[in-house]
Image: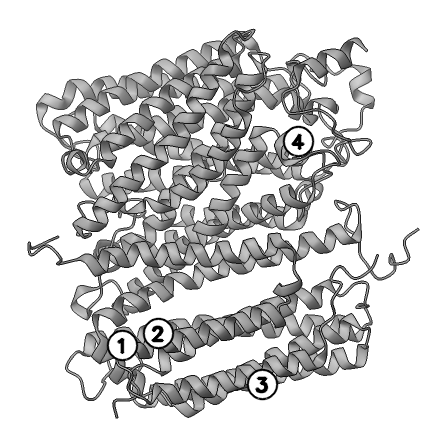
C-alpha cells in the first residue's frame, strides 16, 4: 500500500511557511503599536487567520487532504461562527429599543 | 500477502491499512473540531466582555509583556516547524531525523511552557491574579479587570494543559520512533500527533493578539 | 428452552465468558448491552424521582417534602433522565448494536474508544450519584446562575463534573459513528442505500460532536465560577448571567435533537417493516435528519425569551424556531404516506410507532406555541412547557426506544418477547402517558408554574389525574423489564428474520456471531427492497 498522500511537501516549502509565520507574528506585533482605531482588531484577526490558514494548509497538510477533511474543518469554523454570531446578536442589540429590559 | 504486517497493527475492524489510516485521520480531524467548539465558549466569553469593557481590557492587556509574548509565539511556531519536519522524516523513512525533530519539538514546547510559567509568576507578583489580593492600577473597574485576567488565565491555562498533553503525546511517539515502529508505510500516529500539535499552536496564534495586543497604541 | 441447535451456534454472547470478557470487550454488541444495563438503571432511578414528584403534587400544599427537597427531586429527575438516560439511550444501545450490522461492517471504526465511552458514562454517573447521595443538588437541571454559582448549598460541582465526563462519552460516540458511516460501509452500500436508522444516528452524531463540547466548557466555567468566583457570570464583577444561558442552551437545545432524531430513525424502520413497504420519500427523510441537526443549532435563544435577551435576538430565534419544525413535519407526512396501502401488522413495535407518530406530533405542534414570543411569555416556566417536552421525550423518544427494543430484541438475544404482554404494556404506556401529561398542558396554560410543589386548590383535580396517569405509566414500564428478562430463558427462539424485514442485520444469525457476518456482504439492492427480499426467499 503506497502513501495515502501522493504529495510529500519539500522541507523548503515548510521553511518558507515558517518564515512567513514568523514575519506575520512580527507584523502583528508592530501594527498593534500603531493607532488604527477600530481597525486594529480587524487587522490583528486577519493576520491571525492567515497564520492559521498557513499552519492548516501546509503544516497540517490540509491542501492535500481529502475533500471530506476540508468539509469537516469548514464545518468546525462555521459552527464556531454560529455560536459567536447568534450570541453576539443578543449582546449587540440590547438597548436598541429605548425601553428598559429589552 | 501483506508486507506491512510486521509494522502495521491492522485492527480487526478494518479491511485494509489504507482504510485504517483514512479512518484514524478523519477521527483526529473531527476531534480537533470538538476542541474548536470547546475553546470556542471561552472565545465567546472573551468577545462579550471585551466589547463591553474596552478600556479596562486595554489597560489590563498592556500589563502583559508584549516582547515575551511575541517571542513565545515564535517559539511555538518553531515547534510546529520541527513537528512537520518530524512527520516529513517519518514519511521518507529517516528514523534518526524523526527522533531528533520529535525531541526538538518537545524541547521547544517545554520552553514555551517555561516562559508561560514565568509570565504567570510575574502576574502573581503584580497582584493580577483574580482573587482577594487582586489590584490593577489605572482603572476603577476592578471587577471587570479581574474578568480580563480570569479569561487570560483560563484561556492560557487551558491552552497550557493541552500543551502538556501534547508533550505526553510526543513522548509516546518518541518511544515508538526509537523502537523503529514508524516507516513510510505506517507513520499514522506521528501524523495524528502532528495534527494535534499544530492545532494547539493555532489556538495560541489567536490567543496572542487577543490577549496581548489590545489597545497597545495607548501608552 | 435452549435447543441443541442453538447451543452449538457461536454467537457474540457465548463467544467468551466471565466478567473480564465483558468489561474489557471491544465488541460493539457487548458494549451496547453494557449500555443497556446502565441506562435502564438510570431510567428507573430517574423514575423514582418522578414518582416522588407526582406523589407530592397530589395535594395542593407542599406537605410530603420540604421545598428544598422538592427542588432536589426535580433537579435530579432532570439531570438523570436527560444526561444519563435520554442522551445515550438509542444511539448507545440500538445504535451501537446495529450501526455496524446495518452497514455491513465488522465493528465500529474505534472499538476501544467505544468501550471508553461506556466507562465515561458510568464514571460520570458515579459523580452524579455521589452528589445525589451526599445531599443532592437543587438548581434545576439547567443550573442557572447566579443561584447555582453563588447561593445553592447543593452538590453543584460534583454534578457538573459528572455531566462534563458524561459529555465526553457522548462526543466520542458521535465521533465513532461519523467515521464509521463514512469509512466502513460494505461494498455496494452507498449513502442512499443506507437504512434510515443509520442516517438518523449519523445526523445525531453530528450534533453530539459539534454541540457537546460547548456544554463541557460551560460546566468548566460553572465550576470555576462556583469555586473561584472569577466573576464571569456575576453582575457585580461585570459578568452577565445571560451569557451562561447562551452557552448552556447552545448545547441543550440541539441536545433535544440528539434525543429525538435516533427515535425518528427507529420509527422509519418500524413503519417500513410493519407496512411491508419501502419508506415513502426516502431521500427527504434522510435529508430532513441532517436538516434537523443543522437547524437545531440556530434556535437556542428561544429558551431565553424572558431571560433578558434582546427582543431583536428573540425575534430572530423565534423565526428560526418555526423553521426547524418543517423537516420534522416532513418525516411525519412521509411515515403516514408509507402506511397508505401498506400491509399493516399491529405487532408491538408498530404500536409504539403509532404512539410515537401521534404523540410526537402533538409535542412538536405545541413547540410552535412556545416558539411564538407572545405565547411564550404566558406559558414559559409553566407546566405547558413541561407537557411539551415530555410529549416529545417520553411520548416520542421513549416510545421509539421501546419500539426499537422490542423490534430488535429477537436479533440481540435470539429470543422473542411475549407478544400478548407486550401489546398490553404498550397500550398501558400509551394510556398512562396521555393521562399523565395531557392535563399538564391545561395546568400550564391556566398558570401552574413549573418547579413548584404547592399550588392553588383549583389545580388539584388536574394534578390528581396526572399522578393517576403516572401510576399507570409506571406499570407500563415495569412490565417490559419483567418480560424481557423472562424471555431470555423462556422466550420462543427467534430465527434470523422474524419480521420479514429488509436490512443487513436480518441477514445474519440471531444473535449474531462476534464478527457479525461470515463473509463481508456485498450490497446490490436499495433500502427497504421488499421485492428483492421476496425474490431471495423464492429463489
* Disc 2/disc 3 C-alpha distance (Å): 23 Å
Circles 1 and 2 on the same chain: yes
**Labelled pair 2, 3 in contact (Cβ < 8 Å):** no
* Residue A28 vertical placement versus C85 (above, below): below
Provide the chain ID for the residue under circle 4: C
Mark 3 element type: helix
**Labelled pair 1, 2 in contact (Cβ < 8 Å):** yes
Residue that carries the numbered disc 4 in the rendered image: C102
Mark 2 element type: helix
**Labelled pair 3, 4 in contact (Cβ < 8 Å):** no
* Disc 4/disc 1 C-alpha distance (Å): 55 Å
Total labels drawn: 4
Residue that carries the numbered disc 2 in the rendered image: A42
- Judge left or right: residue B208 versus residue C100: left
* Disc 2/disc 4 C-alpha distance (Å): 49 Å
Residue that carries the numbered disc 3 in the rendered image: A19
Query: Which numbered disc covers residue B79?
Result: none
Q: Position of residue B196 (x, y in %)?
A: 59, 67
Query: Which numbered disc covers residue A38?
Result: 1
- Judge left or right: residue C70 versus residue C92: left
* Residue C8 vertical placement versus A81 (above, below): above
The answer to whether residue C47 is visible is: no
Instruction: Give me the residue at 56% from left, 17% from top.
Output: C272
* Disc 3/disc 4 C-alpha distance (Å): 50 Å
Instruction: Give me the residue at 40% from left, 89% from top.
Output: A30
Q: Position of residue C407 (x, y in %)?
A: 58, 20
Image quarter (top left, top right, bottom left or bottom right) of the N terminus of chain A: bottom right
| Dot 2 crowding, Cα within 10 Å, few <14, some 14–19, many 20+ | few
**Labelled pair 2, 4 in contact (Cβ < 8 Å):** no
* Residue C33 vertical placement versus A86 (above, below): above
Q: Quadrant of residue A67?
A: bottom right
Upstream in the sequence, badge 3 or badge 1?
A: 3
Amino acid at each position: 500500500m503506497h502513501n495515502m498522500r501522493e504529495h510529500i511537501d519539500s522541507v523548503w516549502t515548510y521553511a518558507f511557511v515558517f518564515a512567513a509565520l514568523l514575519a506575520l507574528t512580527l507584523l502583528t506585533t508592530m501594527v498593534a503599536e500603531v493607532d488604527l482605531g477600530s481597525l486594529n482588531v480587524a487587522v490583528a484577526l486577519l493576520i491571525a487567520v492567515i497564520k492559521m490558514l498557513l499552519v492548516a494548509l501546509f503544516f497540517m497538510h490540509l491542501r492535500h487532504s481529502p475533500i471530506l477533511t476540508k468539509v469537516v474543518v469548514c464545518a468546525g469554523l462555521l459552527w464556531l461562527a454560529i455560536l459567536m454570531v447568534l450570541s453576539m446578536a443578543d449582546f449587540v442589540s440590547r438597548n436598541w429599543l429605548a425601553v428598559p429590559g429589552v | 500477502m501483506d508486507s506491512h504486517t510486521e509494522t502495521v497493527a491492522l485492527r480487526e475492524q478494518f479491511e485494509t491499512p489504507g482504510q485504517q489510516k483514512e479512518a484514524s485521520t478523519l477521527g483526529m480531524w473531527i476531534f480537533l473540531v470538538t476542541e474548536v467548539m470547546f475553546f470556542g465558549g471561552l472565545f465567546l466569553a472573551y468577545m462579550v466582555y471585551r466589547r463591553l469593557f474596552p478600556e479596562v481590557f486595554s489597560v489590563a492587556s498592556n500589563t502583559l509583556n508584549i516582547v515575551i509574548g511575541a517571542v513565545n509565539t515564535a517559539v511555538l511556531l518553531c515547534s510546529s516547524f520541527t513537528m512537520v519536519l518530524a512527520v516529513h522524516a517519518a514519511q521518507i523513512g529517516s528514523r534518526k531525523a524523526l527522533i531528533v525533530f520529535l525531541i526538538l519539538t518537545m524541547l521547544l514546547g517545554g520552553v514555551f511552557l517555561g516562559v508561560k510559567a514565568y509570565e504567570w509568576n510575574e502576574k502573581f507578583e503584580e497582584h493580577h491574579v483574580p482573587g482577594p489580593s487582586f489590584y490593577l492600577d489605572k482603572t476603577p473597574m476592578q471587577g471587570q479587570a479581574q474578568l480580563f485576567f480570569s479569561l487570560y488565565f483560563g484561556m492560557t491555562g487551558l491552552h497550557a494543559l493541552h500543551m502538556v498533553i501534547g508533550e505526553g503525546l510526543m513522548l509516546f511517539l518518541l518511544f515508538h520512533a526509537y523502537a523503529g515502529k514508524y516507516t513510510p508505510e505506517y507513520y499514522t500516529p506521528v501524523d495524528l500527533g502532528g495534527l494535534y500539535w499544530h492545532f494547539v499552536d493555532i489556538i495560541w496564534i489567536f490567543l496572542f493578539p487577543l490577549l496581548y495586543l489590545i489597545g497597545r497604541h495607548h501608552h | 428452552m435452549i435447543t441443541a441447535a442453538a447451543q452449538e451456534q457461536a454467537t457474540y454472547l457465548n463467544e467468551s465468558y466471565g466478567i473480564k470478557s465483558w468489561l474489557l470487550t471491544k465488541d460493539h454488541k457487548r458494549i451496547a448491552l453494557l449500555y443497556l444495563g446502565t441506562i435502564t438503571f438510570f431510567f428507573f432511578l430517574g423514575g423514582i424521582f418522578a414518582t416522588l414528584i407526582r406523589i407530592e403534587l397530589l395535594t395542593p400544599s407542599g406537605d410530603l417534602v420540604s421545598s428544598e427537597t422538592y427542588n432536589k427531586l426535580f433537579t435530579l429527575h432532570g439531570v438523570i433522565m436527560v444526561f444519563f438516560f435520554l442522551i445515550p439511550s438509542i444511539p448507545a444501545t440500538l445504535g451501537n448494536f446495529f450501526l455496524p450490522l446495518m452497514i455491513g461492517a465488522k465493528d465500529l471504526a474505534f472499538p476501544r474508544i467505544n468501550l471508553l465511552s461506556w466507562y465515561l458514562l458510568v464514571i460520570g454517573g458515579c459523580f452524579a450519584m455521589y452528589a445525589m447521595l451526599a445531599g443532592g443538588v437543587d438548581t434545576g437541571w439547567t443550573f442557572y446562575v447566579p443561584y447555582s454559582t453563588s447561593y445553592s448549598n447543593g452538590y453543584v460541582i460534583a454534578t457538573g463534573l459528572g455531566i462534563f465526563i458524561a459529555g465526553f462519552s457522548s462526543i466520542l460516540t458521535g465521533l465513532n459513528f461519523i467515521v464509521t458511516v463514512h469509512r466502513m460501509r460494505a461494498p455496494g452500500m452507498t449513502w442512499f442505500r443506507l437504512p434510515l436508522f443509520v442516517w438518523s444516528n449519523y445526523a445525531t452524531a453530528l450534533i453530539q460532536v459539534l454541540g457537546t463540547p460547548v456544554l463541557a466548557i460551560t460546566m468548566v466555567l460553572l465550576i470555576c465560577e462556583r469555586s473561584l468566583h472569577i466573576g464571569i457570570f456575576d453582575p457585580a464583577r461585570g459578568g452577565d448571567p445571560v451569557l451562561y444561558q447562551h452557552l448552556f442552551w447552545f448545547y441543550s437545545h440541539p441536545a433535544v435533537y440528539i434525543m429525538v432524531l435516533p427515535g425518528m430513525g427507529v420509527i422509519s424502520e418500524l413503519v417500513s417493516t410493519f407496512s411491508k413497504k419501502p419508506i415513502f420519500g426516502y431521500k427527504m427523510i434522510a435529508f430532513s435528519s441532517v436538516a434537523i441537526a443543522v437547524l437545531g443549532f440556530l434556535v437556542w435563544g428561544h429558551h431565553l425569551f424572558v431571560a433578558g435577551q434582546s427582543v431583536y435576538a428573540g425575534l430572530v430565534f423565534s423565526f428560526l424556531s418555526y423553521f426547524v419544525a418543517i423537516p420534522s413535519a416532513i418525516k411525519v407526512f412521509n411515515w403516514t404516506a408509507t402506511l397508505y396501502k401498506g400491509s399493516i401488522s399491529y405487532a408491538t413495535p408498530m404500536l409504539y410507532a403509532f404512539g410515537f407518530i401521534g404523540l410526537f406530533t402533538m409535542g412538536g405542534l405545541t413547540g410552535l406555541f412556545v416558539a411564538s414570543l407572545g405565547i411564550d411569555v404566558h406559558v414559559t416556566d409553566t407546566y405547558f412547557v413541561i407537557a411539551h417536552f415530555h410529549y416529545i421525550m417520553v411520548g416520542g423518544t421513549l416510545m421509539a426506544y421501546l419500539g426499537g427494543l422490542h423490534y430488535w430484541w429477537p436479533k440481540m438475544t435470539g429470543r422473542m418477547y411475549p407478544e400478548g404482554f407486550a401489546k398490553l404494556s404498550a397500550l398501558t404506556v400509551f394510556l398512562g402517558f396521555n393521562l399523565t401529561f395531557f392535563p399538564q398542558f391545561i395546568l400550564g396554560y391556566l398558570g401552574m408554574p413549573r418547579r413548584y410543589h404547592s399550588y392553588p386548590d383549583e389545580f388539584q383535580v388536574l394534578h390528581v389525574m396526572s399522578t393517576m396517569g403516572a401510576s399507570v405509566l409506571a406499570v407500563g414500564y415495569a412490565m417490559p423489564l419483567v418480560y424481557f428478562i423472562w424471555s431470555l430463558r423462556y422466550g420462543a427462539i427467534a430465527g434470523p428474520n422474524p419480521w420479514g424485514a429488509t436490512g443487513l442485520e436480518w441477514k445474519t444469525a440471531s444473535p449474531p456471531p462476534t464478527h457479525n457476518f461470515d463473509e463481508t456482504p456485498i450490497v446490490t439492492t436499495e433500502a427497504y427492497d421488499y421485492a428483492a427480499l421476496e425474490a431471495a426467499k423464492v429463489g
